[in-house]
Image (cartoon, helix red, strand yellow):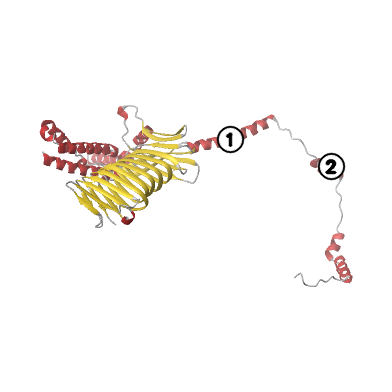
């Protein structure tokens, strides 16, 4: 009897010793680890008149290079604890990288065949695009990151919940953001930013700027060769720092909010409105309107 | 150097060099070596080898040449095709529990409470200030839902979680303001 029990115990131990490591080696059981499956595509195109990048949940790196071709590299990634699920979901993520006439179109999208087979993995795309100088580029993205460097003839960026970084970017620039962040360093040209609930940090801006929006957290640090800066906002926090105030004409209006300006500004307090002006004869104008928020100017 | 004077050796010097060269041991040895003449057949063979021959390829040779050309071109096309084809790579990534949605991130119940309240108590909810806050709350609620959908079950993006935290904070502020109006 005792011998039988010992034998049973031994058998159980042996089975456990074999099965447990096998179970742990199975991807699904390796808790806390994601299986990452990445599909990579590289393509080169002859220069087109414009590029349209319409993507979602994508990281975009757009840069200008010295060549005359357009280089595109795409990474589509699926992450899931089970590799098979990641692989299956990756199949649902499609891409377009094609020329339609004189327009190069780059896209990613999810193709769901039926409601039951919706992707369960974390899906992500990455587009690295190198273009020649002075191109017309438009970007639309949501829930991703965008990095842009270089000179463009025209640049349009529309984002939802994205973090956009621009470095040494110039041209005719239009940005439209909903949530997320815009961080720009050395931005020049005719720039129009329309934002909603976005944190905007601009350093070293030049030429012509128009910024409009609601619920903004807008900070501008240092300007050079600024012709015009016009801000029209509501319920926003606006601060300008590191600006040589003697070089600009200021016209500031705050309604139902707070206005913080250097002592040499001429301020006027009305019932729910506060205005401040400075250097009226200077051509370079900074005009700011904000309601239910703050405007702060510091040297 | 061009300005230095020029000198010519005398004939006597040249004669002496000539005599010494003729008395050289190596030269004497070479003159004493035996002489051999190749036979006529060797010359004929050499002559035949010098005349160019037209090589005629057999049909199967042509097939082999054509096959090689096709193979080389095919290999080039295949390699080019391979280059433009997508590649698949596999790797692993550790999950960070901080980047995953927690039960505390769900503030939908608070929003639903306000919606339910406004269904019953229309007087307060018709107040312009309250209505303005409700519009803001709706916008934030929609943003929160969209962000949660994007974050999903296996998020690895800290920025998305940071954005959700911001939205939820703003939502709390609005809810606080709304409750004071009730």
Q: Residue furthest bottom?
A: B5
Q: How much space separates mark 1 and mark 2, taking CA atoms?
A: 45 Å
State which quarter of the image contains the N terminus of chain A.
top left
Q: In the figure, residue A191 lies in which quadrant?
A: top left
Residue A124 lies, in percent from the top left, at 35, 39
Q: Position of residue B42 (x, y in %)?
A: 83, 44
x, y percentage for residue A29? 30, 40
Please give the chain letter of the residue carrying mark 2: B
Task: Assess disc 2: are there few (<14), some (14-19) or many (≥20) residues with their C-alpha within 10 Å of its C-alpha.
Answer: few
Q: Residue A264's quadrant in the figure?
A: bottom left
On the question of residue B127 being in view, the answer is: yes
- The residue tagged 2 is B44
* Residue A267 or residue A299, whichever sits in front: A267
Q: Is residue A185 visible?
A: no
Residue B44, located in which quarter of the rendered image?
top right
Chain at tag 1: B
């Amino acid at each position: 009897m005792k011998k039988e029990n010992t034998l049973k115990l031994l058998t159980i131990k042996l089975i456990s010793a074999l099965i447990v490591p096998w179970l742990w080696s199975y991807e699904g059981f390796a808790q806390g680890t994601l299986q990452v499956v990445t599909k990579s595509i590289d393509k080169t195109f002859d220069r087109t008149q414009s590029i349209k990048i319409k993507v979602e949940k994508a990281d975009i790196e757009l840069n200008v290079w010295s060549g005359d071709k357009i280089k595109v590299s795409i990474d589509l990634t699926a992450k899931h604890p089970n590799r098979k699920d990641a692989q299956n979901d990756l199949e649902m993520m499609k891409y377009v990288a094609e020329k339609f006439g004189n327009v190069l179109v780059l896209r990613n999208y999810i193709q769901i065949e039926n409601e039951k087979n919706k992707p369960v993995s974390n899906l992500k795309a990455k587009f690295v695009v190198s273009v020649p100088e002075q191109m017309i580029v438009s970007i639309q993205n949501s829930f991703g990151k965008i990095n842009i460097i270089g000179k463009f003839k025209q640049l349009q960026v529309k984002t939802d919940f994205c973090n956009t970084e621009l470095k040494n970017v110039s041209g005719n620039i239009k940005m439209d953001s909903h949530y997320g962040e815009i961080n720009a360093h050395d931005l020049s040209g005719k720039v129009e930013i329309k934002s909603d609930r976005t944190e905007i940090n601009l350093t070293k801006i030049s030429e012509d700027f128009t910024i409009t929006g609601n619920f903004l957290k807008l900070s501008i640090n240092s300007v050079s060769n600024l012709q015009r800066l016009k801000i029209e906002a509501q319920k926003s926090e606006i601060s300008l720092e590191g600006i040589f105030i003697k070089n600009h004409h200021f016209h500031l209006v705050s309604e139902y909010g707070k206005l913080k300006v250097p002592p040499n500004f001429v301020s006027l307090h009305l019932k729910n409105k506060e205005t401040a002006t400075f250097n009226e004869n200077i051509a370079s104008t900074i005009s700011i309107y904000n309601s239910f928020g703050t405007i702060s100017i510091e040297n | 150097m061009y300005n230095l004077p020029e000198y010519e050796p005398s004939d006597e010097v040249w004669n002496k060099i000539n005599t010494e060269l003729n008395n050289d041991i190596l030269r004497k040895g070479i003159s004493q070596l035996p002489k051999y003449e190749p036979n006529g057949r060797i010359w004929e063979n050499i002559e035949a080898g010098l005349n160019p021959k037209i090589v005629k390829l057999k049909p199967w040779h042509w097939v082999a040449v054509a096959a090689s050309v096709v193979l080389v071109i095919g290999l080039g096309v295949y390699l080019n095709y391979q280059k433009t084809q997508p590649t698949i790579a596999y790797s692993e990534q550790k999950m960070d529990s901080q980047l995953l949605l927690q039960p505390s991130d769900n503030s939908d119940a608070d929003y639903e409470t306000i919606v339910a309240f406004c269904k019953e108590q229309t007087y307060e909810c018709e107040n312009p200030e309250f209505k303005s806050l409700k519009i803001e709350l709706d916008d934030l609620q929609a943003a929160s839902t969209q962000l949660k959908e994007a974050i999903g079950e296996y998020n690895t993006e800290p920025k998305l979680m940071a954005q959700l935290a911001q939205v939820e904070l703003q939502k709390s502020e609005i809810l606080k303001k709304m409750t004071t109006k009730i």
